[in-house]
Image (cartoon, rainbow, N blue to C red):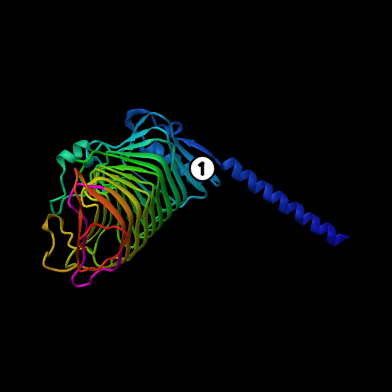
Amino acid sequence: MAINKTKIALIKISVLLFLVSTLQILQATGTFDVTKYGAKANGEEDISKALLCAWEAACNSVGVSTVLIPKGKYALRQVDISGPCKGSMVLRVEGTVEAPVDPNELNGDFWIAFSHIDHFTVTGGGTFDGQGEMTWKKYNCMEKKGCKALPISLRFNFIDNAIVEDITSLDSKNFHVNVMGCKNITFQRFSVVAPGHSLNTDGIHIGRCNGVKILDSNIGTGDDCISIGDASQQITVKGVTCGPGHGISIGSLGKYPNEGPVSAVFISNCTLSNTDNGLRIKSWPALHNGLASNLRFEDIIMSNVSNPILIDQMYCPWNRCDKNGQSKVKISDVSFKNIRGTSTTPVAVQLICSKGIPCENVKLGNIDLQLLGGGTTKSQCSNVKPIITGAVPAGC
């Protein structure tokens, strides 16, 4: 009997501890409104301190904690919102957050950075406004060596298990979003809004990540809608509308030493409209080694697109390379399938591979691209013998 009483007592203690722990979690789960920490929705006073204070309080709480930026207009200088945190974090942006107009008011190459956070959600239907119009007019660093880097609007650095949804990035000064060193992060119903003349404003750039999804999103900007850099694996892009912009790109690759391989990229069910390029893989000549493989592009609609399908291993903007050299990036196992629409250029499919390391196992299937205004398109291939199935523009 004594043993049974002891067991019963231990069970009661365990249950009590469980209930206390659950109660603590429920008590800690809550909303941390930046206006309660001094933020004012007048579009003038900097809310950096209030936002960081609200984040710190939420980050030190267990359970699920939400930092809220309510409806209204808020001025925000520069913040690095970082973890690790004790629980799951939600940043709910319902209002419009505005960057300084002058990029010199920001230190470094970012406006807002999210760093080292696990289980993180950004949501709320709000807008991050980079106010880049004056920057594009005054600070053209594209062709200048040694020019100070302009701030990227949103940096996601070493974030794991995250969702960014129902958020708009407007008029960034540089890239809208840079995703670096992340694992299992999803962008869905994400909007990028900027005019075609905005310089170097990639919508979402991915580098050194594993498990990135971009779903059901609208991206219009002045550079690549989506760009995928080195050491990126398991990347899924589906249901994205791109335009204006430079299309969806893998690369550029081979510019820097020790770049990691790009692999397992699947881009499907996307629409590209009025873009300077369509689906593009690009690498620099005569520089460094690299590898890109297992790349699939399927079920894509093109509308008035220049260079709809392009592998360019002689990528050399502003003549900053040795054009007589050959790319050292190996491209293999690439598939372009079920792609239709209109091209603004006669050469709808152009595969310019490296003479030193030719492309291998490139497949073209069911490519129906008509020349805008009437007429047929053609294909051109260098240092590659694609495997062709179904209708494909003649030439390769």
Q: Magenta stretch containing residue 9, yes or no? A: no
Q: Secondary structure at mark 1?
A: strand
Query: Circle 1 is placed at which residue position?
Result: 65
Determine whether, in the image, residue 107 is placed left or right of residue 237.
left
* Mark 1 closeness class: few <14, some 14–19, many ≥20 residues within 10 Å: many
Q: Residue 95 falls in which quadrant of the image?
A: top left
**Residue 359: x and y, percent?**
25, 68
Q: Which residues are magenta?
A: 342-363
The residue furthest top is 42
Q: Nearer the viewer, residue 116 or 169?
A: 169
**Residue 101: x and y, percent?**
24, 36
Q: Residue 2 falls in which quadrant of the image?
A: bottom right
Quadrant of image for the C terminus: bottom left
Q: Residue 112 falls in which quadrant of the image?
A: top left
Q: Nearer the viewer, residue 292 or 128?
A: 292
Inspect the image, locate mark 1, and give the three-letter code of the amino acid beneath it. Answer: Ser
The residue furthest bottom is 356
Quadrant of image for the N terminus: bottom right
Determine whether, in the image, residue 374 is placed left or right of residue 58.
left
